[in-house]
């Protein structure tokens, strides 16, 4: 048994995203990508897990085990299906979700952009993109009553690197360098959204969530590692120095080696355990990621907005989370200002082109949409309510 020193008000919950769970997001760019001939997506999202209609059931599952917080996203493509045309019905839907979370004792952390855009949007490199995003944010600000934490953009470093990531074939070997025009557009959009939110809702705490994997350079690569990391995550963390919090999303480590004069990621060793996504199974990565983020952002508090593992073995999920939370507890003990932890994800959901990887604390029958909580859901709830990380059972080690 190990105590995790949770400060008063610590956020403790699970996360989802709109496109991955809601279903029938027909006005989005991702819907178009999934359904185009020859798509890189193995499978379309379709009805996903029907959370557009079953969000109350999802929240009940979280609240019933003692989770106090729920991270979900608002779908821009539903709010603004055509340029400058805003759906009052969609805004009302998400307002009901916010009210529903609060009614259940769940504090909502609302993300305004989780990878998907309206199909009419021409991309973050367009000089008009920050203004267009700010226009959307201004509309959403009107329904955020009762929300304390708002995230503008999810993993901007992944969004900016997506064209190269697609060519690389995934994140298993690390994040490629982002495209500069995309990175600049996303940073500007974040700053404008933050300004809009602070003007409309002075009490709201604004941040964004960065993919911060635990990069571990070997000794020859240490001096050159900073230059490698700067475009991939450091610059995006630096954008949070004027925020109220920064989100850290961590799943694995990436070892860095020096190849001549060039730093490159090294593939996991042949004996390394891999997850369903091909990433190295490395629970302690959360501790390294949180410490790195805190080093860059200084006094800005950290919230772990995503951490989890793609596995079909729920005992392994508990073991992974046990290791991750143990590393997080050590960071808290060392004085790192961490204000929350959200597990990814509440539900087994659509994973950006495939239904194969299962990250959820709850399984979902895709035919009937029946939700079946896994033991890991109750386990996570007990850790949050007790502040104790229990010892693993022999079957979970």
Image: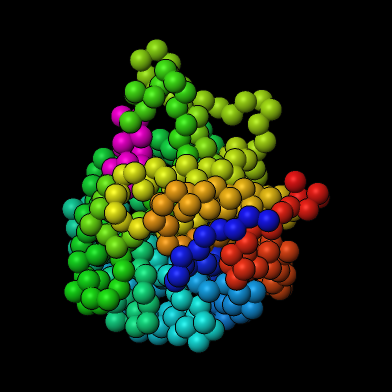
Most distant residue in the right direction: 395
| Depth check, front residue: 331 or 98 | 331
**Viewport quadrant of the N terminus:** bottom right
| Residue that appears at 46% across and 57% down | 304
Q: Is residue 232 located in the magenta-colored stretch of the structure?
A: yes
| Residue that appears at 73% across and 52% down | 392
| Depth check, front residue: 130 or 56 | 56
| Depth check, front residue: 67 or 49 | 67
Most distant residue in the top direction: 260
Across and down, in percent, residue 308 comes to: 58, 53
Across and down, in percent, residue 107 comes to: 46, 76
Residue 278 visible within the image: no
Across and down, in percent, residue 264 comes to: 43, 24
The stretch of residues the image draws in magenta is 227-237
User: Is 386 left or right of 329, judged from the image as shown?
Assistant: right
Query: Relative to residue 231, is residue 183 depicted above or below?
Result: below
User: Is 342 left or right of 189, judged from the image as shown?
Assistant: right
Residue 288 visible within the image: yes
Across and down, in percent, residue 95 comes to: 41, 83
| Residue that appears at 44% across and 48% down | 334
| Residue that appears at 62% across and 48% down | 323
Mainly helix, strand or loop, the magenta region? Answer: helix
User: Is 68 left or right of 209, judged from the image as shown?
Assistant: right
Colour option used: rainbow
Q: Is residue 106 located in the magenta-colored stretch of the structure?
A: no
């Amino acid at each position: 048994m190990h105590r995790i020193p949770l400060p008063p008000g610590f956020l403790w919950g699970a996360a989802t995203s709109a496109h991955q769970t809601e279903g029938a997001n027909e006005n989005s760019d991702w819907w178009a990508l999934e359904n185009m001939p020859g798509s890189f997506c193995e499978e379309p999202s379709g009805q996903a897990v029907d959370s557009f209609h079953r969000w109350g059931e999802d929240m009940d599952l979280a609240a019933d085990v003692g989770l106090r917080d729920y991270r979900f996203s608002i779908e821009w493509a539903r709010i603004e299906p055509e340029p400058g045309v805003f759906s009052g019905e969609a805004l009302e839907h998400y307002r009901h979700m916010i009210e529903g979370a609060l009614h259940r004792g769940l504090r909502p952390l609302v993300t305004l952009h989780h990878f998907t855009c309206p199909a009419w949007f021409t991309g973050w490199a367009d000089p008009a993109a920050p203004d267009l995003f700010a226009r959307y944010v201004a509309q959403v600000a009107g329904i955020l009553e009762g929300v304390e934490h708002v995230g503008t953009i999810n993993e901007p470093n992944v969004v900016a690197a997506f064209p190269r990531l697609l060519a690389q074939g995934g994140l298993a070997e690390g994040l490629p360098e982002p495209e500069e025009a995309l990175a600049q557009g996303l940073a500007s959009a974040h700053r404008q959204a933050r300004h809009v939110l602070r003007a409309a809702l002075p009490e709201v705490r604004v941040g964004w969530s960065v993919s911060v994997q635990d990069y571990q350079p070997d000794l020859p690569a240490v001096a050159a590692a900073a230059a490698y990391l700067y475009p991939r995550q450091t610059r995006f963390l630096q954008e949070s120095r004027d925020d109220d919090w920064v989100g850290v999303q961590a799943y694995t480590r990436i070892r860095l080696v020096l190849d001549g004069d060039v730093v490159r990621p090294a593939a996991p060793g042949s004996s390394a355990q891999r997850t369903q996504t091909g990433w190295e199974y490395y629970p302690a990565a959360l501790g390294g990621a949180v410490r790195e983020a805190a080093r860059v952002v200084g006094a800005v508090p950290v919230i772990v907005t995503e951490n989890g593992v793609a596995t079909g073995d729920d005992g392994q999920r508990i073991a992974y989370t046990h290791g991750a939370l143990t590393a997080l507890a050590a960071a808290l003990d060392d004085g790192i200002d961490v204000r929350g932890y959200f597990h990814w994800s509440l539900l087994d959901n659509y994973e950006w082109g495939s239904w194969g990887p299962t990250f959820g604390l709850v399984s979902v029958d895709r035919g009937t949409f029946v939700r079946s909580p896994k033991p890991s859901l109750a386990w996570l709830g007990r850790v949050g309510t007790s502040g104790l990380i229990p010892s693993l059972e022999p079957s979970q080690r």
